[in-house]
Image: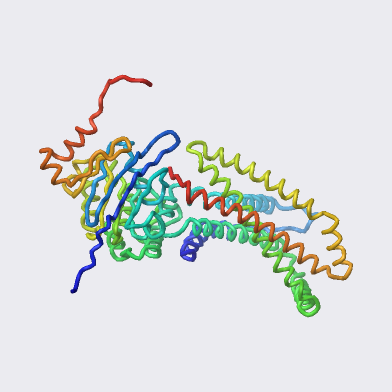
């Protein structure tokens, strides 16, 4: 059933984001073609195009944020909830599908933004063959001489995924807390978000201090001294992932508990 | 012996069921049993608790006290798979077209009849690629009704299906319900427009200020009281104007 829920999330994403993603890439490409080298006077057309590009980038960011909020707030706790909560699926599946959709949209929007920046310099892409040959050489070196770096790369990706989930779930749990009120739900959700963010920052500070203890420092220093830079990095990344999973689990459990036990659609 | 398996457990069972919103008591210790293959009117004025009771049956609300069983199960994944719900508002997402909704119902409900839904949409002049966003309120309501009635559900929960529509549309809605429901299932229609639905009902449940004040077969009720359900409704729920009292 989760797969079926995701199918409709992807349909929704494709209808709502295809336009802005294509627009971002197209405007960047036109900018890249029109752009003059730095230091030279830009033509009015290219100045306008840069303004358009900036506008599209801001729109991309805003629409992504609205999507993340809307998938949960309107998609589950608004009128669409009358459909979603009467489907034969568990609240856990519903929250998971909205979370996955939000993470995917965030990742793809970031990739589109990055790709658009590359397209901005499309006229100066004679460096590309050299860039790709360097990249291939680097990947070959990692594979044959330092395979543990693949683990580092994988852990970095997982870290990004987990902390993206934490950010989204922090919003969800705040909206769910707001839903507990009969009136002024938005105000309570904003208040809850501020409190939850403050508490999580405070907890992170405490954990950061604990990690700075001499025992931990000495252990990592000794690893680095023995030439295990990669191992030390991997352990550090794993600890950050574990911390993210901890926060994500608390927010997820809180969100599903509220919508399972205290759902009250207006 | 070749015996037909008949399920004698009530389809709906509410036991001491209460629901409050803060200080407001929407339902107060409701005791109710409804069998299978019945068309039941959930009758009461606005604010009597009809929608709250239906939402509890759908699992959209949780009881404050007591319990509720649908086909022997507490509201959850199973009961949602056998219950077809028509809410009193629109539940569509703006990005959808009518085909998306038909696909969604076909994906999630085993008892959904895609052919029937497509035919009903076609009769209503709704094309598969018609955007929900561009449909009129009346068309959206009819689309929701077509989707709900294209299921062979055990229980149909229809919340105010004829409220706020003209008499011609009321006839269309009622005939759509009567010609499409699963006859082994039960239809629970909440309304305060009694005269329009009276002829279709097997049973009537009168709900007043969160209490079930009467639950009887419509024929017995008419025979005993010597009046129509509509007349009885007016008698039970007659407003007492200018009574005064504390603010």
Coloration mode: rainbow
Q: Residue furthest right?
A: A225
Residue, x 49% and y 50% (percent of image)? A259
- Left or right, B247 with respect to B223, comes to right
Q: Quadrant of residue A114?
A: bottom right
Residue, x 73% and y 72% (percent of image)? A150
Along the viewing direction, whichever of A264 and A63 lies nearer the viewer:
A264
- Left or right, B222 with respect to B22, comes to left
Along the viewing direction, whichever of A242 and A109 lies nearer the viewer:
A242
On screen, A225 above or below B171?
below
Quadrant of the drawing holding the C terminus of chain A: top left
Residue B224 spot, x, y in % from top left: 11, 40
Residue, x 31% and y 36% (percent of image)? B46
Residue B201 spot, x, y in % from top left: 19, 48
Along the viewing direction, whichever of B188 and A141 lies nearer the viewer:
B188
Residue, x 15% and y 42% (percent of image)? B221
- Left or right, A255 with respect to B84, comes to right
Residue A167 spot, x, y in % from top left: 63, 52
């Amino acid at each position: 059933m989760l797969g079926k829920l995701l199918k409709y999330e992807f349909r929704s994403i494709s209808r709502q984001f295809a336009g802005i993603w294509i627009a971002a890439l197209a405007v960047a490409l036109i900018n890249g073609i029109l752009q003059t080298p730095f230091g030279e006077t830009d033509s009015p057309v290219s100045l306008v195009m840069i303004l358009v590009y900036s506008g599209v980038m801001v729109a991309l960011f805003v629409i992504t944020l609205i999507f993340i909020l809307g998938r949960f707030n309107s998609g589950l706790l608004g009128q669409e909830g009358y459909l979603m909560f009467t489907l034969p699926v568990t609240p856990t599946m519903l929250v998971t599908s909205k979370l996955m959709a939000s993470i995917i949209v965030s990742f793809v929007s970031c990739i589109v933004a990055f790709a658009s920046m590359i397209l901005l310099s499309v006229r100066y892409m004679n460096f590309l063959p050299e860039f790709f040959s360097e990249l291939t050489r680097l990947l070959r070196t990692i594979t044959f001489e330092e395979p543990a770096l693949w683990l580092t790369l994988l852990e970095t990706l997982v870290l990004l995924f987990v902390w993206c989930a934490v950010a989204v779930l922090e919003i969800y749990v705040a909206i769910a807390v707001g839903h507990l009120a009969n009136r002024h739900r938005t105000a309570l959700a904003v208040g809850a978000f501020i409190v939850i963010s403050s508490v999580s920052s405070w907890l992170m500070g405490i954990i950061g201090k604990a990690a700075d203890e001499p025992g931990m420092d000495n252990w990592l220093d000794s690893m680095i001294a023995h030439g295990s830079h990669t191992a030390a990095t991997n352990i550090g990344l794993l600890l950050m992932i574990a911390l993210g999973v901890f926060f994500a689990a608390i927010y997820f459990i809180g969100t599903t508990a509220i919508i399972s036990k205290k759902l009250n659609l207006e | 012996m070749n015996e037909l398996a008949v399920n004698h457990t009530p389809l709906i069972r509410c036991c001491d069921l209460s629901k409050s919103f803060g200080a407001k008591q929407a339902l107060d210790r409701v005791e109710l049993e409804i069998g299978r293959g019945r068309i039941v009117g959930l009758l009461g004025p606005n604010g009597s608790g009809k929608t709250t009771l239906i939402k509890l049956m759908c699992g959209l609300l949780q009881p404050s006290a007591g319990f509720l069983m649908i086909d022997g199960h507490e509201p959850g994944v199973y009961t949602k798979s056998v219950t077809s719900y028509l809410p009193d508002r629109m539940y569509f997402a703006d990005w959808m077209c009518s085909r998306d909704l038909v696909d969604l119902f076909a994906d999630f409900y085993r008892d959904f009849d895609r052919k029937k839904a497509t035919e009903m949409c076609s009769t209503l002049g709704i094309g598969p690629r018609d955007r929900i966003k561009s449909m009129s309120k009346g068309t959206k309501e009819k689309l929701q009704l077509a989707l709900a009635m294209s299921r062979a559900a055990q229980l149909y929960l229809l919340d105010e299906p004829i409220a706020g529509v003209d008499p011609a549309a009321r006839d269309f809605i009622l005939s759509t319900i009567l010609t499409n429901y699963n006859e082994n299932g039960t239809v629970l229609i909440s309304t305060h427009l009694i005269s329009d639905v009276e002829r279709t009902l097997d049973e009537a449940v009168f709900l007043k200020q969160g209490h079930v004040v009467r639950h009887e077969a419509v024929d017995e009720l008419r025979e005993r009281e010597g009046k129509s359900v509509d007349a009885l409704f007016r008698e039970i729920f007659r407003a007492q104007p200018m009574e005064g009292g504390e603010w």
